[in-house]
Amino acid sequence: MHTEDTEEFLLPRSRLANERLHALIPGGAHTYAKGDDQYPEDLAPVISHGRGAHVWDIDGNRYIEYGSGLRSVSLGHAHPRVVEAVRRELDRGSNFVRPSVLEVEAAERFLATVPTAEMVKFAKNGSDATTAAVRLARAATGRPRVALCADHPFFSVDDWFIGTTPMSAGIPAATNELTVAFPYGDLAATEELLTRYQDEVACLILEPATHTEPPPGYLAGLRELADRHGCVLIFDEMITGFRWSEAGAQGLYGVVPDLSTFGKALGNGFAVSALAGRRDLMERGGLRHSGDRVFLLSTTHGAETHSLAAAMAVQTTYVEEGVTARLHALGERLAAGVREAAAGMGVGDHVVVRGRASNLVFATLDENLQPSQEYRTLFLRRLLAGGVLAPSFVVSSALDDADIDHTVDVVAQACAVYRKALDAGDPTPWLAGRPVKPVFRRLA
């Protein structure tokens, strides 16, 4: 059981395991966003297992989990339909010297689910897919520059993107100079950028939507700008894919990109991503054309059978069970409850829920209504002590009303402490250690 007193909530086994992780793995995790620097000091649980919307740490505590697998496990852990599909393939072999029949079946299923695309190629992670899209755009246009949306936090681990972040060590300046940025929602600024670099920009790459809805006409306006300036429009649908609609944001908003990339929810935790798009572009990475060949995607494990089976099961489940609608309904219930709890404790302007209902995040603001890592630390400490593991409030369809109600109760308790800290003008006494840190920062 979790205690009401945060100071008594200790994770001794997780703390020791984190020390072992750091001794063996740079950063102590295989994804920076999963690092223990993202959690209050000595309160970063190391997971034993998960089922549905719950996970257990190696200290024996159970949590309601949000943002599962960095938004990838949208159906909940060990989902029966996905596990069954994967298990069917495990005894049949996972990788062969020639394509498996599953590759064509998975491609047919994906293109039926995302009918705005004409061809698809699977990979293992989102970075490979987005970088392949950029390479394809450069090859098709003969242009060197990439224009990315400055307001979206992550596109790839590759140099063309990471060079734009504070963690740019090891990336040549010449590479950084080829990436330029445009603001989300501002067509005039984007047109000015394209005019400034006339005939140099190969592509516009962005998440079609994130924590705010696209302004009316914005995506259609980008489509028109890309056409007029001769560049490729790429939608990064790693997050919006399936969470906005089964066909992604492009299916919801009715604007068709030239290329799009999917991942995360596509495999419900299994490693699969996709690059999809127009046939004439995608074929440049194939064998049925007479031009220069593009090394599009060629990965040893890209067509691993059980991951493709997982992707097909995910798509079937989404369509047959109306999962996207359920994610929105759960998110709306959670957002309303959190906002009511925060307002009731007098911190409604400080604990702020943002985003589409299926992709909620929260902001923690200080006395001056500025984002605060200290207040985030305080808030996370109380959530963890109450059995809620929530770096975000991104829901999975495995949550039920009781989970949401418990979360709201724990949020209310956290907000009561938050109010005390605001009244004191200093959250430090409630932190019990260093504050959590941003993922992207120059120094460790």
Image: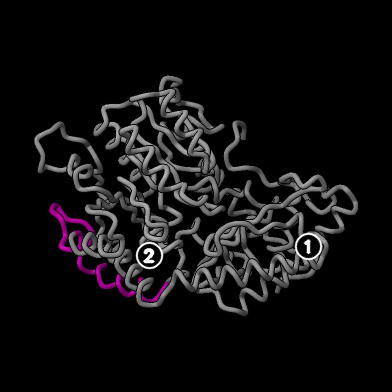
Magenta segment = 79-103
Report whether 357 appears left or right of 363: left
Q: Is residue 170 magenta?
A: no
Q: Quadrant of residue 253?
A: bottom left
Say if residue 8 shows up in the picture: no
Q: For this rendering, which residue is in front, 333 or 214? A: 214
Give me the residue at 88% from left, 48% from top: 425
- Pinpoint residue 247: horizontal percent, then vertical percent: 36, 61
Which mark identifies residue 415? 1
Crowding at label 1, few (<14), some or many (≥20) Cα neighbours within 10 Å? Answer: many
Give me the residue at 37% from left, 44% from top: 223
Which mark identifies residue 96? none
Amino acid on which the number 2 mark rests in the picture: Glu
In the rendered image of this protein, does residue 300 appear above or below residue 379?
above
Local secondary structure at mark 1:
helix
Q: Is residue 94 magenta?
A: yes
Q: For this rendering, which residue is in front, 76 or 334? A: 334
In the rendered image of this protein, does residue 150 appear above or below residue 121?
above
Q: Choose the circle earlier in sequence order: 1 or 2.
A: 2
- Pinpoint residue 185: horizontal percent, then vertical percent: 52, 43
Report whether 3 appears left or right of 205: right
Local secondary structure at mark 2:
loop
Amino acid on which the number 1 mark rests in the picture: Cys
In the rendered image of this protein, does residue 227 appear above or below residue 42?
above
Q: Which residue is mark 2?
A: 246
